[in-house]
Amino acid sequence: MKLFIDASKITDAPIEDNYLVKDMINTNLVNELLFSKPTTYLVSGYRGVGKTSYIKALKNELISKAKEKKENVLFLHINVGKYSDFPTFLRALIRELYWEINSNDTNNDYKNNNKELLSDIDLIFDRTFNNIDYKVNNKSLIENEIRQGIKFDLSQFITRLLISGVGLSVIVSYIKEGNLSIYISLLIAIGLILFVFEKKKTKNASQLIEVNRANIYDDEIAEHQLYKIIRGLRESGIKVVFVIDELDKIEKDDEIDNLIGELKPIMLSGNANFILISGQRLYYKYQLADTIDDAVLSSLFSKTIHIPFVSIEVLRQFFKKLMINNITIDKELLTTYVDSKILLSHRVLRKFINLIRHDMKFQDDGQCYLTIPDEKREIYKTDSRLIVIIEKIEQEYIGESDYEAGIKDLLVSQLYIAVKNIKKLKLLDFQVSDIVGTNVMEQTNYLIKYRGQIDEVISLLLEEMVERGILERIIINEDTEEFKYKWKDEIAVEHSIKEMSFLEEFIFIERMIREIVNGLIKQKYIHKYKENFNKSILSLNECISILKQNEIMSYGMLDELKPLTYARNNIAHGKPMNELNVNNKLLSEKHLVKMKYEIFEELIYFLLKRNNAYKDIESNYDGFDFSIGNLAIEVKIFKKVNVFKNNLKSISNKFNSLNKNNGELLVIGLFQNANNEELERAYIQLNDMNIENGISVIVINEINIPQLEEILSNAIDISVR
C-alpha cells in the first residue's frame, strides 16, 4: 500500500510550539517562576520524549506571561552535553548570561539604570575569551653623588713657571735684604702657581622602588563575580531562570556529581531559578538519595517534573496529521502498521519519527510517501495485539498505582523492553527471569529497588499473552508447578535473521543433546549421573556433564558448547550478537552445522561400538562416515527434502563408483524440526526416486535410541547375509 504523507511536518529538532508537549506546561510552574522565591527544579524523562521541546514551550509561556504582568525575565538555556570540567561550564554560563542580557528582548530601561552592573558583566564576559590585566605601578627614585680624584694640567704649569721665574728673581732680592717673612709668603705663592692639585671625590648611588598591583582572575573569582552579578540582577527586579540541559548526555556519574556539587552554592543562593534537565538515571539517583547519609541530591531539588512517554493515542493522531490525499487505503493494514511503529519506538517521540523517516520515499515530483507491505500484515497484527495488552496493563495496574510518574514510566519501559526480548525468543522456551532485562539491572543499581514491581508487570504481560492466544505454557515439573512459556507456532513475529538463525541451530543442537541423554538413560547405558538429574527436563549443562562423565562423546566437542550456551543466554536477554565476547567463527552457521553433524556421528559411533564390540568399525571409510565389513554408513541432517534428495543422488553415485564387492549402503537422514506429517511426505518423495539395490535410506525426525539401534542392527544383519 502506498501512503502519501507531508514530510515538512517531520522534524528531529525540538519544537517550540509543539502540541505534543504544550498541554504538559503547568500554569502553576509559570507563576512560581515569576512570583515565588527562586529555587531549583529537576526535569526528568527518557531520552527523546520531548524534554527540550517542553522547555522551549515553557520559555514561550513564561515570557508571554511576564510581558502581560510587566515583569522582566532572563531565560538562559545552557547545554552541557559535552561537559569536560566546571571552569569550562562556568565560562559557558557567563557567556549565555551576557548574550541574553544584550539581546533585543531585554528591557532598555533596565540597561540605562544599571550601567555599572552591565560594565561588570561586560568585563567578566571578556575574560572568558581574553586574558585582561589591570596594573597600578608606584615608583620612588633616590640619588646621591660623591666624586674623588687628582687633576694635573701641563700647559698651565709652563705658563705658571714663566710667571714664577719673574717672581723668583724678586724673592732673591728680598733674601739679600734679609726680609724673611716676605720670603716665606712668596715661596708659598710660587708653589701654588706651579702645582695646582684638584681633588674631587665622587659616589653615585640610585634606588628604584616599584610596586605593581594586577587584578587576579581565576575560577573562584569568576564564580564570585557571577554570584555578585546574579544577585545584582535579582535586586534590580530581573527574574533569572537558568536551564541546565542535556545532563543525560554525560555518561559518567562522578562527572554529574562534580558538576552539581560545584554548582550547588549558586543554585541554593536564592538569587535565580535553576532547572536541571536529565534522563531517568539522575531521577532514580535522586529517589534513592534519602537512603544515603548526607547525599548531595537529597535536599537539592524543591520539585521534580517528569516528562512522560507520549501516549499511544497522541502518537496515532500525530501520524494521522502527516497523511495527505489518501482516498483509498487499507484501514486495517494502516492501523496495525502505526501500532507496530509505536511498539518499536517504545512510545519515544524521537524514535517514532525516526522509524517513519526510515520508510519514507520520494517521487520525482517531490511528493513523499510510505510503502506499507501487505506481506507483513500478520507481523503488524501481532504488534498491534501487543500494544493493546501493554495499554491495558498500563491503565489497569500501573496507572492505578501510587507510584510517582517517573516510576510509572520505568514500569512501562520495562514492558516494551520485555516484548522486544520475548520476540527474540520466538523459537525458545523461556521464563520471566529470561526476559526481565538482566543486562540493564547489572548496569544500573538504582533499578534493583524496583525489581519486584518489574517482575510483577512482566508476569501480567505474559499471562495476558497466554490469555489472548499468543503464548502457551509448558509444564516443566508437575510437582512444583514449574512452567515455561513458548510462542504459538502460528504467531508471526519480525526478528533478526542472523540472531534467529543462530538460535534455531542452537535449539536443535540442544534438543539433540537432551534426546540423546534421556534415551541413553532409559536404555540404562548411562550410570554415572546424580540423582537430582532425574527430573522431567535436564538443563543443557547437566546433559553435557553426563555425557562427559560416561565418556559418550569427545571432551573437545562438548567443551565447544560452552561459548554457544553463553551466546544463547545473552541473545535471549536482548544483547546483540556483535556485542558478545565470543569468537565469531563459533557463532557462524557453518560451525553450528558442523557441530550438529559431529554430535550425530559420535552417537552413531557409540551405538555401533556398544552393539558390535567384536567387529572392526572404521570411520571415514572411502569418504563415508562409517563402515563395518561390507556395510558403509552415511548420516545426514537436513531441513528441506529437496536438498536431501540432491545429496542422496551424489551419495548414490559415489557409492556405485566405489562398490566393487557388492556391499551395502545405509543412509540415515535426520529431518530437522519436522513433524510427523512432514516426515510422511518426505518418505513419499523419496519413494519416487529410483534408489538402486544395496542402498537403504531411513529418515527420522527425532533421536530415538532404540529406533536407531534397530536400524543399525538390521542393516548389519543384511550386510552379513
Image (tube, grey):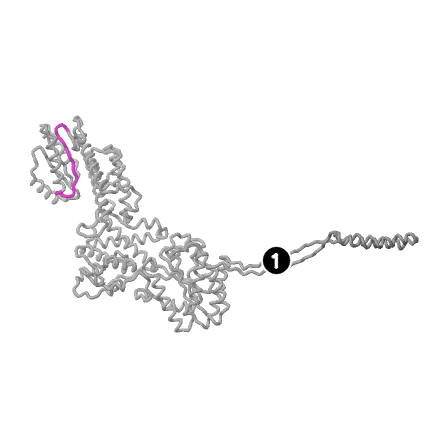
Front in this rendered view, residue 213 or 271:
213
Q: Which residues are magenta?
A: 628-642
Q: Would residue 714 be visible to someone looking at this image? A: no
Above or below — where is 228 with respect to 480? Answer: below
Quarter location, residue 385: bottom left
Quarter location, residue 702: top left
Q: Which residue occupies 46% across, 65% down? A: 271
Residue 281 lies, in percent from the top left, at: 37, 55
Quarter location, residue 511: top left
Q: What secondary structure characterizes most of the magenta part?
A: strand
User: Circle 1: is it few (<14), some (14-19), or many (20+) Cα within 10 Å?
Assistant: few
Amino acid type assigned to the residue bearing label 1 in the image: Glu
Q: Is residue 549 left or right of residue 217?
A: left
Q: Would residue 151 be visible to someone looking at this image? A: yes
Residue 676 lies, in percent from the top left, at: 13, 43
Residue underneath mark 1:
210
Residue 341 lies, in percent from the top left, at: 24, 58
Above or below — where is 620 with respect to 120? Answer: above
Front in this rendered view, residue 52 or 655:
655
Above or below — where is 635 with respect to 194? Answer: above
